[in-house]
Image: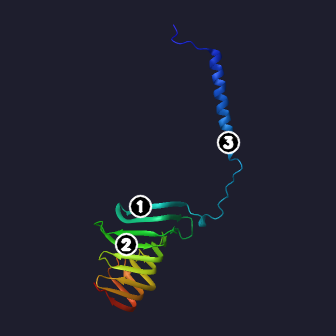
C-alpha cells in the first residue's frame, strides 16, 4: 500500500529544472570575476603579515595582564630584518602594576614597537601620565622596556599639581615617577 503516488513524468521534469538552475548559478558565479588578478608580494619584509583596525586589546606576560592597548590601525611586520609593529593612526597604551592599577599611560599620534628589542618609539603629540597624576607632553618619546627606561631629547612639559616644568632632554624610569630633566628652561607655579 502506497501512502502517496509519484508521477514519474513530473519528478523527471522537476529534476531537470533544478539541474538547469544549479548549472546557471554556477556559470554566473564562476565567470563573474574571471579577469581579476592579484599582484604577487615582491618583498615580504615590507608587507605586513597582519593588519588590524580599531584594536582594543589587553597584553599579558606569563598570564599576568601588563598592558591595555587601543589603536586605530595595527600593522605587524614579522618578516622584516628587525620585526616591528606599526601604529600609523596612533596608540593609547596603559601599563598596569601587579595590582592592576594604571602605572603609566601613553598616547601619541604615531608609534612603532620593535619586538626583539622591546623598544617603543612614540611620535607626534606624545602625552603621558604617571600613577601620581603628573602629565608629560613632548613631540617624541622613547621607551626601552628591556632597560626600563623612558627618555626624550625634545622639549618636554611636565604638569604637576602645583607647578609646570619645561625643559629640554628628559630621562625617567618606565613608571615615570623618578625622572631627570637635563636642561630646565622654566618652572611655572600653577595658580588656583
| Few, some or many residues within 10 Å of mark 2 (<14, 14–19, 20+) | many
Q: Is residue 26 above or below residue 93?
A: above
Gap in angstroms between the C-alphas marked 2 and 1: 15 Å
Residue at (35%, 63%) from the top-left corner?
65
**Residue 118 drawn at (x, y percent):** 45, 72
| Few, some or many residues within 10 Å of mark 3 (<14, 14–19, 20+) | few
Asked which secondary structure carries label 1, the reply is strand
Pointers 3 and 2 in contact (C-beta within 8 Å) = no
Q: Which mark is residue 131?
A: none
Read off the residue under disc 3.
Answer: 30
Q: Which mark is residue 57?
A: 1
| Few, some or many residues within 10 Å of mark 1 (<14, 14–19, 20+) | few
- Mark 2 or mark 1, earlier in chain: 1
Read off the residue under disc 2.
Answer: 105
**Of 83 and 136, the residue lying toward us:** 136
Residue at (29%, 86%) from the top-left corner?
191
Amino acid at each position: 500500500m502506497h501512502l502517496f503516488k509519484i508521477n514519474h513524468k513530473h519528478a523527471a521534469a522537476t529534476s531537470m529544472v533544478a539541474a538547469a538552475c544549479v548549472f546557471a548559478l554556477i556559470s554566473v558565479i564562476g565567470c563573474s570575476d574571471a579577469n581579476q588578478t592579484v599582484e604577487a608580494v615582491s618583498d615580504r619584509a615590507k608587507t605586513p603579515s597582519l593588519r588590524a583596525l580599531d584594536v582594543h586589546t589587553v597584553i599579558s606576560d606569563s598570564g599576568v595582564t601588563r598592558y591595555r592597548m587601543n589603536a586605530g590601525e595595527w600593522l605587524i611586520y614579522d618578516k622584516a630584518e628587525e620585526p616591528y609593529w606599526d601604529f600609523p593612526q596612533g596608540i593609547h597604551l596603559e601599563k598596569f602594576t601587579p595590582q592592576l592599577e594604571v602605572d603609566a599611560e601613553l598616547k601619541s599620534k604615531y608609534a612603532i614597537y620593535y619586538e626583539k628589542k622591546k623598544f617603543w618609539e612614540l611620535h607626534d603629540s606624545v602625552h603621558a601620565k604617571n600613577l601620581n597624576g603628573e602629565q608629560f607632553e613632548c613631540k617624541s618619546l622613547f621607551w626601552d622596556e628591556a632597560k626600563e627606561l623612558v627618555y626624550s631629547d625634545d622639549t618636554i612639559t611636565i604638569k604637576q599639581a602645583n607647578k609646570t616644568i619645561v625643559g629640554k632632554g628628559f630621562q625617567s624610569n618606565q613608571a615615570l615617577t623618578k625622572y631627570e630633566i637635563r636642561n630646565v628652561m622654566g618652572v611655572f607655579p600653577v595658580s588656583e
